[in-house]
Structure formats: structure tokens, C-alpha cells
């Protein structure tokens, strides 16, 4: 007696193609391009999917935002720059420290922008190390990882946007 796959091989091929197509769409959705108004001109930014992270007191989300000059990690909780250990790392490459905290909840990377973008293009995953709540008891650093699948395409689209 034949099993269903041997009996109806076309079903598996069709079903598997649908499943893999859906998986590719989900991966591509990890990075999006959106139009932002900045001053009098339009520009586009590349944003990652929001990822959950524990800030030491509660679950929040973090998101990476890339424009033409900065890579920013946006969080829902206030960041603590007092220990100089907030940064990111693509795969097994070196840690890159943030340059500054902006508006209390943004880890801003400007100095190493080109290096970060190039590493994002060739990497598979980036891990961001965050530290929260400067006026509360110290809870240490909190890592959060983001897939880099789809970044290169989204970034190219954002940089071509006018």
C-alpha cells in the first residue's frame, strides 16, 4: 500500500511550495520601509519587527530603525547609559557601543553607521544589549536578537526613496 505522499506526489509539491512561500513572506516581513516626514522633505526609514525584551521589571518591545545617517534601537523603557555597555553585535563580530541615548528611550549609533549597515547586509542576526532604568536598582544588561533576513532589500528600497 502506498502512503499518501507516494500516491499523490503533486499534493506534497504544491503544499510544500505554499508553505515555503509563506515562510519567505514572514521572513521578508522582518524589515519594513516606511515614509517619514522630516522637516520639509520626505525620507524613508527601514524598521525591524518589534521584538520582546525584559527590562528587568516587565516585558517590553524593542525595534531597530535605520535611516540614512543613524541606526537607532527604540525601546518602551528608559535606557541607562551610565555603564557604557549598551551596544550591538552581528553574529560573531565585535560589539559596537552606542554613541548616545536620545530622548531617554533611543540607543543611537552614528559613528559606526557604515560598518553596522554593512554587517547587517551580510549577517543573519544582530543581538542588541540594553540596560534600563538609570534611577532604579540595577538589573544588568538585557539582550534582544533581531533577524537580519530581508534587511538588505528593505534598506536599498529605503535609500532609493525620495
Image (cartoon, rainbow, N blue to C red):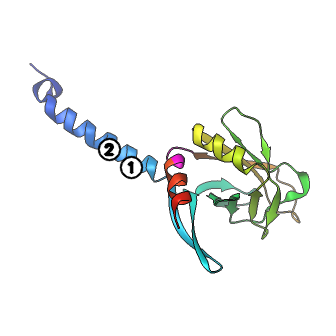
Secondary element at tag 2: helix
Q: Position of residue 95 (x, y in %)?
A: 77, 40
Relative height, residue 72 to residue 12 (above, below)? below
Left or right of residue 17, residue 141 in this image: right
Q: Between residues 19 and 160, which one lies in front from this camera angle?
A: 160
Which residue does the numbered mark 1 point to in the structure image? 25
Query: In the image, is residue 64 part of the stretch drawn in magenta?
Result: no
Q: Residue at x 21, y 33 (%)?
A: 13
| Residue range of the region highlighted in magenta in the rendering | 148-152
Q: Residue under label 2, please give it.
A: 21
Question: Where does residue 73 sit, x and y in percent of width and height?
Answer: 69, 58
SS under mark 1: helix
- Place of residue 32 in the rendered image (x, y in percent of width and height, measured from the top left): 50, 58
| Mark 1 surroundings within 10 Å by alpha-carbon count, few (fewer than 14), some (14 through 19), many (20 or more) | few
Q: Position of residue 34 (x, y in %)?
A: 52, 66
**Depth order, front residue of 123/39:** 39
Amino acid at each position: 500500500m502506498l502512503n499518501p505522499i507516494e500516491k499523490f506526489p503533486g499534493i506534497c509539491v504544491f503544499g510544500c511550495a505554499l508553505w515555503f512561500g509563506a515562510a519567505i513572506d514572514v521572513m521578508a516581513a522582518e524589515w519594513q520601509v516606511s515614509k517619514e516626514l522630516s522637516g520639509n522633505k520626505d525620507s524613508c526609514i527601514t524598521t525591524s519587527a518589534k521584538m520582546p525584551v525584559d527590562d528587568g521589571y516587565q516585558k517590553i518591545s524593542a525595534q531597530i530603525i535605520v535611516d540614512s545617517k543613524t541606526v537607532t534601537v527604540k525601546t518602551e523603557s528608559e535606557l541607562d547609559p551610565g555603564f557604557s555597555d549598551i551596544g550591538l553585535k552581528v553574529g560573531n563580530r565585535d560589539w559596537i557601543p552606542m554613541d548616545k541615548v536620545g530622548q531617554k528611550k533611543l540607543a543611537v549609533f552614528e559613528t559606526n553607521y557604515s560598518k553596522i549597515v554593512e554587517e547587517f547586509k551580510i549577517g543573519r542576526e544582530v543581538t542588541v544589549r540594553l540596560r534600563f532604568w538609570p534611577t532604579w536598582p540595577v538589573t544588568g544588561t538585557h539582550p534582544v536578537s533581531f533577524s537580519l533576513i530581508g534587511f538588505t532589500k528593505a534598506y536599498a528600497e529605503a535609500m532609493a526613496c525620495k
